[in-house]
Image: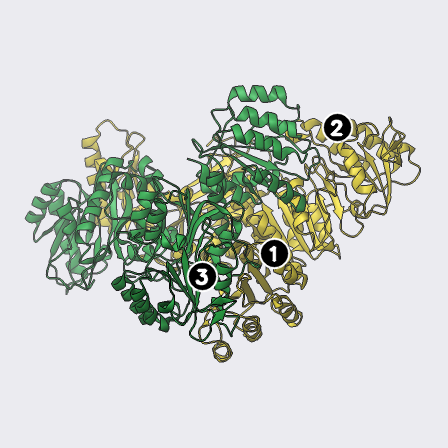
Chain colours: A green, B yellow
Amino acid sequence: MVKKSNVNLDKIYENYNLKSVKSVLAKNAKEAEKAAVSIGFPVALKIESPDILHKTDIGGVELNIYSEEEVKKTYTKIMNSVKSKKPDAEIIGIIVQEMFSDCFEIILGYNFGYSFGPTIMMGMGGIFTEVFKDVVFRTLPVNFNDIKSMIHELKFSDLLLNGFRGILPVSENMLIDVIKKASDMAYDLYPRLDSFDINPIALRGNEHRVIDFKYILSDKLNKIRSSEAKVKNLDEFFNAKSVAVIGASGTSKEKLGNYILDSLAFHDYKGKVYPVNPKSKSIMGIKAYPSILNIPGKIDLLVISIPLSAIPGILKQCNKKGVRNVVIISGGGKETGEKELEEEIKKLSKQYEIRIVGCNCVGVFDGFSRLDTFFQIHDRMKRPKSGSISMISQSGTVGLAFLEKMGDVGISKFVSYGNRIDVDEGDLIEYLGNDKRTKVIAAYVEAFDNGRKFLASAKKVSQRKPIIVYKSGRTPQASRVSESHTGFLSGTFNIIKGVFNQAGIMSVDNFEDLVAASEVLVMQPRAKGNKVLSITNGAGTVIQAVDKIDEKGRLRLAELSPSSKVKLKEKLPSYVIIKNPVDLTGSATDDDYEVTINIIINDPNVDIIMLWFVFQDTPVSKNIYSILGNINKACSKPIICGAIGGEYTYYIGKLIKNEGIPVYYSVNEWVAAAEAISK
Amino acid sequence: MVKKSNVNLDKIYENYNLKSVKSVLAKNAKEAEKAAVSIGFPVALKIESPDILHKTDIGGVELNIYSEEEVKKTYTKIMNSVKSKKPDAEIIGIIVQEMFSDCFEIILGYNFGYSFGPTIMMGMGGIFTEVFKDVVFRTLPVNFNDIKSMIHELKFSDLLLNGFRGILPVSENMLIDVIKKASDMAYDLYPRLDSFDINPIALRGNEHRVIDFKYILSDKLNKIRSSEAKVKNLDEFFNAKSVAVIGASGTSKEKLGNYILDSLAFHDYKGKVYPVNPKSKSIMGIKAYPSILNIPGKIDLLVISIPLSAIPGILKQCNKKGVRNVVIISGGGKETGEKELEEEIKKLSKQYEIRIVGCNCVGVFDGFSRLDTFFQIHDRMKRPKSGSISMISQSGTVGLAFLEKMGDVGISKFVSYGNRIDVDEGDLIEYLGNDKRTKVIAAYVEAFDNGRKFLASAKKVSQRKPIIVYKSGRTPQASRVSESHTGFLSGTFNIIKGVFNQAGIMSVDNFEDLVAASEVLVMQPRAKGNKVLSITNGAGTVIQAVDKIDEKGRLRLAELSPSSKVKLKEKLPSYVIIKNPVDLTGSATDDDYEVTINIIINDPNVDIIMLWFVFQDTPVSKNIYSILGNINKACSKPIICGAIGGEYTYYIGKLIKNEGIPVYYSVNEWVAAAEAISK
C-alpha cells in the first residue's frame, strides 16, 4: 500500500464502531496476564518479531489459553522455544489476542469508479471470493432497503443467515448495521480513498470482527460527477418542423447524406427539408443551400454526416442561425482514438447551448412525426408504426434491429446516441419519463459514462413506467486499481447488476429478451404476482421452460387451486394431465383450450397464463386466434403465447398477435416475456 | 446411517490406500506420549467422552504440541480442566491426533443411480459444496483421461493446483491417484452400496487425508443394466416398402389415423399403403382391410393410433403375419400413470422380436424414402428435403419443430421415440452411427432411461460423426438417496454433463442452439481450432458475442497475425479499426468485406471466420451473397454469418444460405454455431 498521507488510516474503521480482533503487545509475562484479563478468555499468544515469518513452526503460537496462570506459563514456554530455535531473532514481545473462531468470513469493500463514483461491495470472504465471484454492489450512499436487498442477492447469504455445521447463524440486523458502518466510512472517505477491502470480516451470531483492512489512497481528489439530467430542448429532436441536412451531394449520389435526405424528404415526414451543400444547387430535386446561414426559414434540427473536423465551424453557424438541435451521424471520433475533436465539439455544445445527439450514430426516429435521420433506406429497413415503446441505444446497429422487430407493435421515440458528446442515457431516460406517449422504455447500453446520472434518472422514472435495459460489454476488464479485490470485481458486470437493482430497472441478458420484454409490457396488463401456469398441446417445450424458470429464479410455477382442478377434470377429456402444465395432448381442440383458459382466468393461484401451441397438430383449428382474441378482451391477467415451427406457425402466430396477444417463437423469449410482465 | 451388514465398512477406504488422519486413543499420559511419537509431531490432544459435546469450551482440546514432554503436561492439563468443569462426565481417554492443517478440502462421492449405474463425483468440499454446486461426475469405471478431464472441469481446481494464501499447491498426480482409488473402491462396492461421501478429504502438496467417510448400504443388490444396443430390424422403419395403418376411419374423418394415412398415401412416399379398419371398406379412396391378417402382401411397417388396450392383440396378429416393425403413435401409457399396459406390450415386443417405436410419439420420417407417420398434415407442416442430418427426439413437438427448421438443410432419418417401449436412444445412436447417409446426429432428450446404453453407443459413434444433444429436464429433483451429498447433487444436470463429456457428445443448452449446431456441421468444414475472428459493418452485436464467448469459455478471440494487420491496413480505408472484430463501419462496401476475408483466410491465427452484417446499411449490396458464395467454394475454414433485421435481412440471408453458408439471426445462435464447428 502506497501511503501518501500523514494520517494513519490503518484502524480508521474503529472510528465507525467496526471492531477488530482485540490484541495487545506484551513485553513480559505480567503484561501478558493483564492483557489477557482485559481481552477476556480464551486468548491466543503469538510471538512478535520482524525476523520470524513462520511462527508456528518454532513454537511461537499457542491457542486456547483459559487462565492467567496458563498465560504466564505459556509466555515462558513460547520465549524458551523461540530463543532455542531462533537465537538470533530480535524479539519485540508477545501478542495476546482474542480468540474468534467458528465464524463466517465475508468481504466488505469499497471502490471509487469513473462511472458510478463510490460503491460498496459485499461478498463471500476468504479463499473463494474470486473463484465464485459471489459479490453484490451498490452505489453510495445506501439506505436500509438497499442493504437488505444486497444481503438477499448474495447466494452465500442463505448459509450466513441460517448457520452451518455448528457455526452460529449471523444476525441480519447486525449484518445490516455492519454494512451501514462500512458504507458510511466509505462515503466519508471517498474523496481521498480509491478503494478498501475489509477482508475478511468475521461474523458469528451477533458479533463481528475485522480481521484485515487494506486501503488504497487516491493520488487526486475523487469527485462525484453531477447526476443532474438535462432535458432542455430535447423535444425538437422528435418534433422538428424543419430539418437541414449537411452531407448530401448533387454529384456523388451514394453519400450517406443522400440516403438521409431520402429518408426525410421522400417518405412520411411532413416537415420542411433543406439540403446544404456549397457545390450543388439542388440535390435529389430539392433546392440546396450553400450553408445553413442561407436557409430562409427557421431550422429546428440539423443532421450532419460529414467528417468531424468540419463540425466546430458548423456549430458556430448554428449559434448564429439559432439552431439548437444537431444530430451528428459521422464516426471518426473517440472510437478511432480521435478524442480532441470530440472534446472541442462538446465544449462548443455547452457554450452555445446546442443539444447534440451522436456522434457515431444513426440518429433519431419519431413514430408520430415520422421524422427520421437514418441512412438505411426504406427498401432495406421498414420503419415501425407509431406506438408506446421508446428505445435508446448506444449502438445504431442494435437500435435499428430493435425497430424492425417492433414494426407492428409500434414505437414512440428512438435515439441512437452513439458517442454521447452531449445527450446521454441519463438525459434521455428523464425526458422519456415525462413523455406521455411513452409507456415503456427500452435501452441498449455497451458502457456507461456518467452512470450516476443514469441511475438517478432511472430511479425516478422506474416508479412511473418500466425501464428494460440490455447491458452488453460484460467481459471483466482489468481495473484501474487492480491491487484491491473490490476494484477487481467492480470491473465485471456485478456493479451494473447492483445499480440496476437500486434503480428499479429490469435487466435482460440478450437482444431477444429485450424485444420480448418490451413487447409484452405494452401489449398485456402487468401481472399481480409471479406465478405462471402453462397450457399446452405438446408438453416437450414446457419442460424446457421449467428449466429456464428454475435457472433464473424470478417466476414460480403456480399450483392449481382445488376448485380449478375439479372443474378441469369435469370439462376436459380423461387423458388430459391436470397439473402445471395442463397437458391437453396432441388431441387438443380449440374448445379444450378455451375451456381451460376460462377456468384458469378465475384461479387466484395463477398470475400469468402461458399458452404453448403446436399449431401443426390438426385438432387445433385456425380459428383459435379469434377465440384467444375474445378471451383477451375480457381478461385482466396477462396471456403470453409460444410456438415453434415453420410457415403455418408464423401465419397463425401473426393472427393471434393482431388480437393483442404476443407470440414468441422460442422458449427463452416466452419465459423472458413472462418474467417482464410479472411482479 | 442404517447398517444392514455385519461387515464394518467405516474404514474400508484404508484397504484402497486412502489415508485417514492418524489418531490414537490414549488412556494415560504414557500412552499419549507413545502415540505422539508414532504419529509424528506436531499433534493435537482431544478429550474423548460421550458426555462432552463442546470440547473446546471446557479446555478439552490442545493443538500444536511439539514434544513428548509437552504431551505429558498437556495430558494432565486437559484432564484437570475437564474434571474441574465437567466432574460428572464419563471420560474414555484422550485422542492423540495428527495435525493436518493449511490444506484444501474436497469431496469425493459415489452414487448408484437408475440410469447411469455407479458414478463418481468430485467437488469442492466443506461449507460450500451445496451452495455453489461446483461438482463433476463421471460414470464408473473411469480411466486416466476421464479423471484428468474431471479435475480440469471443476472451477475450484485452478485454486487447488496453484495453491492459495500459503496453502501448498496440490499435486495433480496425487489427486488423480486419490480419485482413482476412490473410484476403484466405488466400483468394487457398488452392488451393496448406494452411496458414499468422502467429505472432506484434505489435500496438501503430495498428501491427502480422509477426514470423514459416510456411506449408505443398499437394501437390494445393485446391478448395472445391459448397455448393449439392439439395431436389428431398425432399417425397416425408414425403408419399408409397404405400410399398414390402424386408426384411420371411413366415417370419422378427423381421426389422427386419417391424417397419418394422408401423409403416407397422398404425398411423396412411393410404397404401398394399407388402411386397416373392420368397419370400412375403403378410407380416403383406398381399399381398407378388416385386419392386418387380411392384407395380401408383406407388411414392412405397421402404424397404430388406436388406444393402447387393443395393441397386445394386434401384436399377436403381427407375429402371425410376420410384421417386424411397429410404430405406436397413441398416448395413454405411463405418462398418464398406466404403466402395466406398456409393460405388457414391451414383453410381447421381446417375445415376438417385433421392434416398436413409441408409444406416445409422432413416429418416423425418412428424407430419402419420404416415408412419414406424422398426423401433422402437409398444409401445416412442410416436410424437410433430404440431407445428412439425422435427429432423434423424445418429444414429438420438439422433433417436428426441428424438422421444420431444417427444411432447406435436409434430413436423413428422424425418430420421435416417445415412451421408448422398445427402441431407445442407445439403439438409435448405434444405428445412425452406421448409417452412411447420416453425417450429423442431433438428439433431444428429456430424461434418460438406460443411460449407460446411450453412453456406450455415443462413445463409439462420436468418434466417427458429431452427436449434438439438447437435454432438458434439468431442474434438480429430490434424489432417492437424499441423505448423501453426492446423491443429492446427482439429481441435478451435473451428472449428465459428466456423461456427455465422457461420451464425446456436444451438449447444447436450448433448441435454437441444437438447430444452429446441427446446421453448421453439415454446411461447413470442421475448424482446426477454436480461435474466432469477426468482421462486421456494425460492431454493436459483436460486443454481445464477446460476452457470450467469454461466458461459455469454449472459443477464443483470435489475435490477427502481424502480416494480416499490415495487409489490412494497406487495403482498407483508414477509418477501419483493425483488431478483433475488424470493424469496417457502416460505410463498408462489398469490396471491403471481400478484401478482408481473403486476407483472413490465410491467417494461421484464425480458425473460424464470423461475419456479422448490417444488411440495412446501403453501401453493402445485394451482390454480397455471390461474393461470399465464391469465397466459400475455395475456403477450407468455416465461415458463419449473422444479421438481425426485418424482411430485407431475411431475403439476403436466404441468398447467402443457398450458397452453403449458414446465416443466424441472433447472436447466441451465431456463437453456438461457431462453438459447434470449433475443435
Q: Does mark 3 fall on the same chain as mark 1? A: no
Question: Please, what is the three-letter code of the amino acid marked with disc 3?
Answer: Val
**Residue topped by disc 1:** B650
| Mark identifier at residue A273 | 3
Q: In this view of the protein, which residue sits in the foreground, B377 or A151?
A: B377
> Within 10 Å of the Cα at label 1, are there few (<14), some (14-19), or many (20+) other Cα atoms?
some
Q: Chain of mark 2?
A: B
Q: Is residue B364 visible?
A: yes
Mark 1 vs mark 2, CA separation in Å: 44 Å
Say how many tags the image has.
Answer: 3
Considering the numbered disc 3 on the image, is that residue within a helix, a strand or a loop? strand
Q: State which quadrant residue B349 falls in.
A: top right
Q: Is residue B354 visible?
A: no
Q: Does mark 2 fall on the same chain as mark 3? A: no
Q: In this view of the protein, which residue sits in the foreground, A154 or A500?
A: A500
Number of the front mark, 3 or 2 = 3
> Within 10 Å of the Cα at label 2, are there few (<14), some (14-19), or many (20+) other Cα atoms?
some
**Residue topped by disc 2:** B307
User: Residue at position x 23%, y 37% from top?
Assistant: A174
**A192 to the left or right of A250:** left
Q: State which quadrant residue B130 falls in.
A: top left
Number of the front mark, 1 or 3 = 3
Mark 1 vs mark 3, CA separation in Å: 32 Å
Q: Name the quadrant of the C terminus of chain B.
A: bottom right
Question: Please, what is the three-letter code of the amino acid marked with disc 1?
Answer: Tyr
Considering the numbered disc 2 on the image, is that residue within a helix, a strand or a loop? loop
Q: Chain of mark 3?
A: A
Relative to A503, say whether A591 is above or below: above
Question: Please, what is the three-letter code of the amino acid marked with disc 2?
Answer: Pro
Estimate the x, y position of residue B633 in percent, counting from the top left. 67, 70
Question: Which residue is situated farthest in the front direction here?
Answer: A296
